């Protein structure tokens, strides 16, 4: 997929192009407006459509719940983990791994050439990626068996630092997931896993695709809504 940000009148719109898409759609999220378009659609057509829907877009933006300002990552900050809020505390001058105790992540940080906050963030991201990889691998194995998805050692599962997506599945069945999904509720992580595995049967978002997803996750819309409402909180680290 190719993405581009453009300014249309007073609206900033992220254009997301896909060769699989057949028509233009608009989405309004807490992080902004997205125009999902076919790969060959002229920008002029997209601009005209957004301009036509300008009044509706402003109304939809006003209807969004007010988003609180992102708190800076620091000692004592809170982050999402498995759908709940946990506090981050730095243990200056201590060695060892990160520990989770009483809804608090204890992060050992040695004095080094890096600022303490940056060192703590780097260590936390590494820890979160490791936990995400383990959880995702387990859930993929579980749902692949449930959905009769044939997977072999040749099929890869990767954890990546995506900016605009939670997961992907290529035409060979290789899967990739945003490591930040470990911050979501476990049931929402499961939805993302099922969503990507469903692409092994339907490499699109057709009615049949959503039927496959809903056979496993009948409340998938609730998980989509959670990601739309809370996704920005998963980028505070």
Image: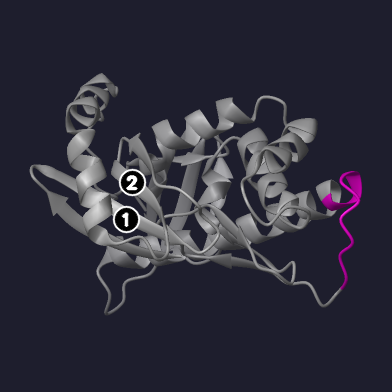
Label 2 element class: strand
Q: Where's residue 145, x and y in %?
A: 90, 50
Q: Mark 2 highlights which residue?
A: 34
User: Closer to the camera, 226 or 198?
Assistant: 198
> Which range of residues does the magenta coloring cover?
144-152
User: For the stretch drawn in magenta, what is the main secondary structure?
Assistant: loop
Q: Which of the marked residues, 1 or 2, is nearer the chain's N terminus?
A: 1
Point out which mark residue 46 bears.
Answer: none
Residue 222 sits in which quadrant? top right
Instruction: Say which residue appears at 61% left-offset and 46% top-offset.
Output: 205
Specify the quadrant of the image occupied by residue 38.
bottom left
In the rendered image, which residue does mark 1 sit on? 15
Q: Can residue 93 be seen at all in this image of the molecule?
A: no
Horizontal and vertical percent for residue 18?
Answer: 47, 61
Q: Residue 5: x, y in percent?
A: 23, 58
The stretch drawn in magenta includes residue 150: yes
Check the image and report above or below for 162 versus 89: below
Judged from the image, the secondary structure of the residue bearing numbered disc 1 is strand
Above or below: residue 60 compared with residue 1 = above
Q: Is residue 178 left or right of residue 233?
A: right
The reply to whether dot 1 and dot 2 touch (C-beta < 8 Å) is: yes
Whether residue 217 is visible here, answered yes or no, is yes
């Amino acid at each position: 997929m190719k993405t581009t940000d453009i300014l249309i009148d007073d609206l900033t719109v992220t254009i997301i192009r896909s060769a699989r898409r057949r028509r233009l759609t608009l989405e309004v999220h807490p992080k902004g407006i997205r125009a999902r378009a076919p790969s060959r659609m002229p920008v002029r057509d997209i601009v005209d459509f957004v301009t036509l829907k300008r009044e509706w877009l402003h109304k939809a933006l006003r209807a969004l719940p007010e988003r609180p300002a992102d708190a800076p990552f620091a000692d004592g900050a809170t982050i999402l983990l498995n759908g709940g809020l946990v506090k981050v505390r730095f243990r200056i001058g201590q060695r060892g791994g990160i520990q989770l105790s009483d809804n608090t992540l204890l992060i050992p940080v040695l004095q080094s050439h890096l600022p303490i906050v940056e060192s703590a963030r780097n260590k936390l991201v590494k820890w979160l990626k490791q936990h995400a990889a383990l959880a995702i691998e387990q859930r993929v194995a579980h749902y692949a068996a449930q959905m009769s998805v044939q997977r072999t050692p040749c099929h890869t599962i990767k954890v990546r630092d995506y900016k605009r997506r939670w997961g992907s599945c290529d035409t060979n069945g290789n899967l990739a997931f945003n490591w930040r999904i470990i911050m979501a509720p476990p049931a929402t992580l499961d939805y993302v896993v099922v969503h990507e595995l469903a692409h092994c049967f339907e490499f699109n978002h057709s009615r049949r695709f959503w039927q496959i997803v809903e056979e496993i996750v009948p409340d998938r819309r609730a998980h989509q809504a959670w990601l739309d409402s809370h996704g920005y909180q998963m980028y505070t680290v």
